[in-house]
Image (spheres, helix red, strand yellow):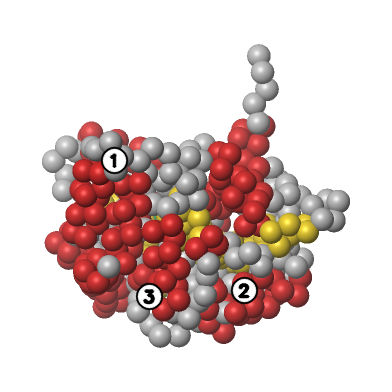
Amino acid sequence: MINVNDNFLKLPGSYLFTEIAHRVAAYKEANPQAPVIKMGIGDVTLPLPAASIMAMQKAISEMAHKESFRGYGPEQGYDFLREAIAAEYKQTGVDLAADEIFISDGSKSDCGNIGDIFSTNCKVALTDPVYPVYVDTNVMAGRAGELLPNGQWSNLVYMPVSAKNGFVPELPKEKVDLIYLCFPNNPTGTTLTKDQLKVFVDYAHKNGALILFDSAYEAFITEKDVPHSIFEIPEARDCAIEFRSFSKTAGFTGTRCGYTVIPHTVKAKGSDGQVVELNKLWLRRQCTKFNGTPYIVQRGAAAIYTPEGKQQVRQLIDYYMGNAKIIRESLLKAGFEVYGGVNGPYVWMATPNAQSSWDFFDYLLKEKNIVTTPGVGFGPSGEGFIRLSSLGSRENTIEAMGRF
Ligand code: PLP
């Protein structure tokens, strides 16, 4: 028998959402009539923008003719999409070349795969709670060490966020190499101001660290002083990579498209001391392991940058943020302790009477028929919280809030 990668054996039982799905399925089997409302997994519910649909229909027609048929595309994405994204960045004052943008099948893949290009010796820092993909992929790569009884991994450096620090992580106390930041945040729905984010950029500069900035939810920002991109801080061009996704922005969770930005100025070194552009390494990685996002999907994605597309995306986001407002205000009015929901589609709610996350999850499922996400699934500091998603329908959101 061959040996497996032992790191996989270190991963605890099941992925968070698999466990949730399992509990919901068991409850529904026993109670088939129960009017269960899903506010757990952050999946969208509204259809794709009409501009994307039309662009994809046109792309399908192109595939039907020998003259316009497309086979393998460029691994890093078609120029029409990379240029449209660069033009969009430019409008917010961020200058990027199209070849600093890599199109992918979504940012989960990118956030997970990016670790391929870093040494397994890199010390990793992340917030707690956190999007589990950052943790689990570092476990798989052997950077996380061992799982401790308190739910933390021995080699990861945790930056807890809570009401105590206003959900603003403190800088790592020890020197780290890679820092994962996700703002607007999943799961807490909170954000950083530009000044607060700059503290991390300055740290990365001073310590030769790299920030992996996940801005999957940037389209949901409503407040002025909140950066949409880490590259709004000019110094970040030397020390940050940014991940973005069409999933929540434009309903592409099932259609699959995202992108990663790696400026040519972001560099690191090999163990022999040679300095390399991370952009080149990622291109090499993608060309070897990835064969590109479908042409049809990239056409659909590019359509969100047309005037109609922009307007349609705005409508989608406004709808979801309308739900977020309802959730946030209803829960506050009912006396619960809640955070987020202003610049992101998630509301982070403290469980009443210090119940555990899973106990409150089970209570809401069984007594109120509402599916949430237990905060502890995002890390030990998420204990005592649940996450509510505003990406459902308005009717279900209102109905669920009534049940609270
Ligand atoms: N990053 C964060 C913080 C997310 O919450 C998600 C999805 O929930 C992703 C990335 C993945 O997005 P995609 O659908 O593009 O893979």
Helix, strand or loop status at disc 3:
loop
Measure how far apart labels 2 and 3 are at the Cα level. Answer: 20 Å
Q: Given the current orientation, which residue lies at the most extreme right position?
A: 272
Residue under label 1:
67
Contact check, label 2 and label 3, Cβ < 8 Å: no
Q: Nearer the viewer, residue 107 or 33?
A: 107
What is the crowding at mark 2: few (fewer than 14 residues within 10 Å), some, or many (at least 20)?
Answer: many
* Quadrant of image for the N terminus: top right
Amino acid tagged 1: Glu
* Quadrant of image for the C terminus: bottom left
Amino acid tagged 2: Ala
Closer to the eye: label 3 or 1: 1
**Quarter location, residue 279:** bottom right
Q: Nearer the viewer, residue 219 or 397?
A: 219
Measure how far apart labels 1 and 2 are at the Cα level. Answer: 43 Å
Amino acid tagged 3: Ile
Helix, strand or loop status at disc 1:
loop
Residue under label 2:
236
**Quarter location, residue 277:** bottom right
Whether residue 19 is visible to the viewer of this picture, yes or no, is no
Measure how far apart labels 3 and 1 are at the Cα level. Answer: 42 Å
| x 61%, y 35%: residue | 8
Residue 243: x and y, percent?
50, 60
Residue 289: x and y, percent?
55, 39
What is the crowding at mark 1: few (fewer than 14 residues within 10 Å), some, or many (at least 20)?
Answer: few
Residue under label 3:
221
**Earlier along the polypeptide chain: callout 3 or callout 1?**
1
| x 38%, y 75%: residue | 221
**Earlier along the polypeptide chain: callout 2 or callout 3?**
3
Q: Is residue 125 above or below residue 95?
A: above
Helix, strand or loop status at disc 2:
helix
